[in-house]
């Protein structure tokens, strides 16, 4: 019995350490890509009008790469309890040699959803930048638009949709019981399903990056910590409602300030 528990602790530690490594690499890549995206904008701000404007395709690919790395860095920590629970469950039916592939498939399915979101976010970012609505840090330069987005994100925090998706993210074993599928393809499908719940829970929070700056690393970290806290903190703590109040108040202040 002691040996079994020891192996379980070792397996769980290996999963957590691996995901921490993935997160660290994603943050490093995000920092590099964000710096690369700021360079052309800084050149334009310094009136270096001789510098060629990046093509739409190049700008989109760079924006997508940044968003994709950003979503890995921000969302993998909050997915760690679910991935660890999935790894634990694979001990019951898979031989040790096949378990790493199943866990990797689950994580890949989860990230596919967020990379799909990254495609949309990158398209929005490039479109807004092309019409001159973004600052050099990737924030919307129209206070009325920013305030409206903050209020909408705050109201979403109080919606039944948000609560339903968050409940699925907060109960790893309940999700696994309801969604279990065998094999690597089943693991991929389960990861996609979990990613869909997570996206439904958090996508409007991610749009707040357009208010604070899509290349502002500090705000990325703040939002990532908030998402993690929503999923793992004791339910008696009103983290979601506190976030809603903050977003709505911030949004109203921004909107009203723009009208003065």
Image (cartoon, grey):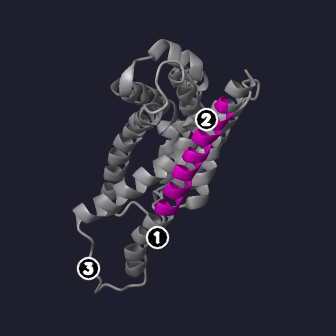
Q: Main secondary structure of the magenta part?
A: helix
| Quarter in which the C terminus is drawn | bottom right
Give whichever of 88, 214 is nearer the camera.
88
Name the residue rendered at 73%, 29% in the picture: 238
In this rendering, does residue 155 appear at all? no
- Closer to the chain start, of discs 1 and 2, is 2
- Placement of 95 over or under 111, stated as above or below: above
In the rendered image of this protein, does residue 30 appear above or below residue 78? below
Rendering coords of residue 1 (x, y %):
73, 20
- State the extent of the magenta-drawn residues as a range: 7-30
Please tell me which residue is depicted at 52% across the width and 13% down the height of the picture: 177
Question: Distance of mark 2 from mark 3, alpha carbons?
Answer: 51 Å
Q: Residue at position x 61%, y 53% from top?
A: 221
Asked if the magenta segment contains residue 27, the reply would be yes
Dot 2 or dot 3: first in sequence order is 2
Would you name the residue on which mark 2 appears? 11
**Circle 3 is placed at which residue position?**
52
Q: CA distance from mark 3 to mark 1?
A: 18 Å
Would you say 69 lies left or right of 56 here?
Answer: right
- The residue that label 1 is drawn on is 35
Element marked by disc 2: helix
The x and y percentages for residue 208 are: 52, 47
Q: Nearer the viewer, mark 3 or mark 1?
A: 1
Mark 1 to mark 2 CA distance (whole Å) = 37 Å
Mark number, residue 99 = none
* Magenta-drawn stretch contains 19: yes
| Residue nearer the viewer, 110 or 133 | 110
């Amino acid at each position: 019995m002691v040996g079994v528990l020891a192996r379980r602790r070792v397996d769980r530690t290996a999963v957590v350490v691996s995901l921490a490594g993935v997160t660290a690499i994603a943050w490093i890549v995000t920092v590099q890509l964000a710096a690369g995206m700021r360079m052309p904008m800084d050149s334009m701000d310094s009136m270096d009008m001789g510098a060629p404007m990046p093509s739409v395709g190049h700008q989109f690919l760079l924006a997508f790469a940044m968003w994709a790395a950003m979503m890995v860095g921000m969302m993998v920590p909050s997915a760690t309890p679910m991935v660890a629970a999935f790894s634990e469950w694979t001990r019951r039916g898979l031989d040790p040699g096949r378990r790493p592939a199943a866990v990797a498939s689950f994580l890949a399915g989860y990230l596919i959803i967020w990379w799909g979101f990254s495609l949309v976010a990158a398209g929005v970012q490039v479109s807004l930048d092309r019409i001159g609505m973004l600052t050099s840090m990737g924030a919307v330069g129209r206070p009325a638009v920013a305030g409206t987005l903050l209020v909408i994100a705050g109201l979403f925090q109080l919606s039944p949709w948000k609560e339903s998706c968050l409940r699925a993210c907060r109960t790893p074993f309940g999700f696994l019981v309801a969604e279990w599928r065998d094999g690597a393809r089943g693991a991929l499908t389960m990861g996609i399903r979990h990613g869909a719940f997570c996206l439904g829970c958090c996508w409007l929070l991610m749009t707040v990056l357009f208010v604070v700056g899509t290349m502002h690393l500090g705000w990325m970290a703040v939002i990532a910590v908030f998402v993690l806290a929503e999923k793992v903190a004791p339910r008696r703590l009103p983290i979601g409602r506190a976030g809603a109040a903050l977003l709505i108040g911030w949004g109203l202040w921004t909107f009203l300030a723009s009208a003065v």
